[in-house]
Amino acid sequence: MNLINGFFSLFYPTQCCCCKRYIKDFRYFYICEKCYNSIKNINQNVCKMCLKPLSSEYVDICIECRERKKTYFEYIKASVYYESPIKELIHIFKFGQKKSAVKILGKIILEKTGDEFFNDIDYITFVPLSKKTSDERKFNHAKVLACYIGKSKGIKVLDVIKKIKETQDQSNLKREERLKNLKDAFEIKKEKEKIIYGKKIIIVDDIYTTGSTINEIAKILFEKRAQKIFGLVVARAL
Ligand SMILES: [Zn+2]
Ligand SMILES: [Zn+2]
């Protein structure tokens, strides 16, 4: 182990958060090189809006996207599917208070997303947390991700959305329940409404599941006349 790795081992865990192997190379922070190299790309034949794998090559939009009452975002970009080792990485980032995991998650997003997606984007924003959740988690992981991406791409990050309703954990809810749960949960900060007008905005979050959260936020941005809204997440849940 060289000096730099020795130095890092003082601050970062020495076991890969996925396979629990001893980490000798700290380039990937909380995961080992082998787990990093096992990360798969998003499939080829996927929904053009939400990246869900499609069973037929004769359609380009999945049933969920077709059946959604109205979609307020153009499409979403995800780097990978929500599976190991990304699953474990997101978990320690979100619930283990390992803020520095943003360096590897952000790197994965930037590598897999490519520069073109960021062309002409005016602002990046993020899914807000309620005050209670934010206090519990110590930081908003979506905001930390948005700031990492914004800084790397030279795009301003807007803290423009407020969560005004305490919602249930979405992961245990069905699609219909998610929609109900999120209804009137967010609003645009009054003093910032005008900034949004005519702008192209990316909403950042960690995982895309049914799109209810991103669509709800896109809706309120749309109502304030944002021109185009996109979603950007680390992982697409299957
Ligand atoms: Zn590993
Ligand atoms: Zn879809």
Image (tube, rainbow, N blue to C red):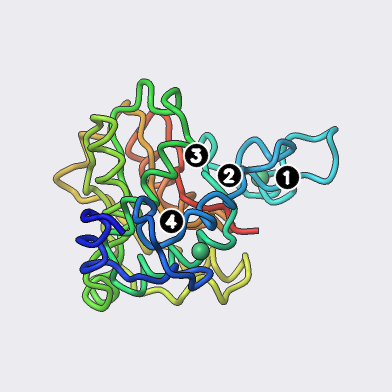
Q: Which residue is identified by label 2?
A: 70
Where residue 122 appears, as percent x and y from the top left, is 29, 28
Pick the front one: 19 or 130: 19
Q: Give the label on residue 206, or none.
A: 4
Q: In the rendered image, which residue does mark 3 sit on?
A: 73
Mark 3 residue type: Phe
Mark 1 CB near ligand 2 (8 Å cut): yes
Which quadrant of the view contains residue 130? bottom left
Q: In which quarter of the image is the C terminus?
A: bottom right
Check disc 1 and report its element: helix, strand or loop: loop
- Residue at the (25%, 70%) spot, across then down: 134
* Disc with the residue nearer the chain's start (4 vs 1): 1
Q: Are marks 2 and 4 in contact (CB under 8 Å)?
A: no
Spatial CA span between label 1 and label 2: 14 Å
Q: Tell me, for residue 237, which label it has, or none.
A: none
Which disc is residue 62 wearing? 1
Question: In the rendered structure, are the residues bearing label 1 and label 2 in contact, judged by CB atoms less than 8 Å apart?
Answer: no
Mark 1 and mark 3: span between their CA atoms? 15 Å
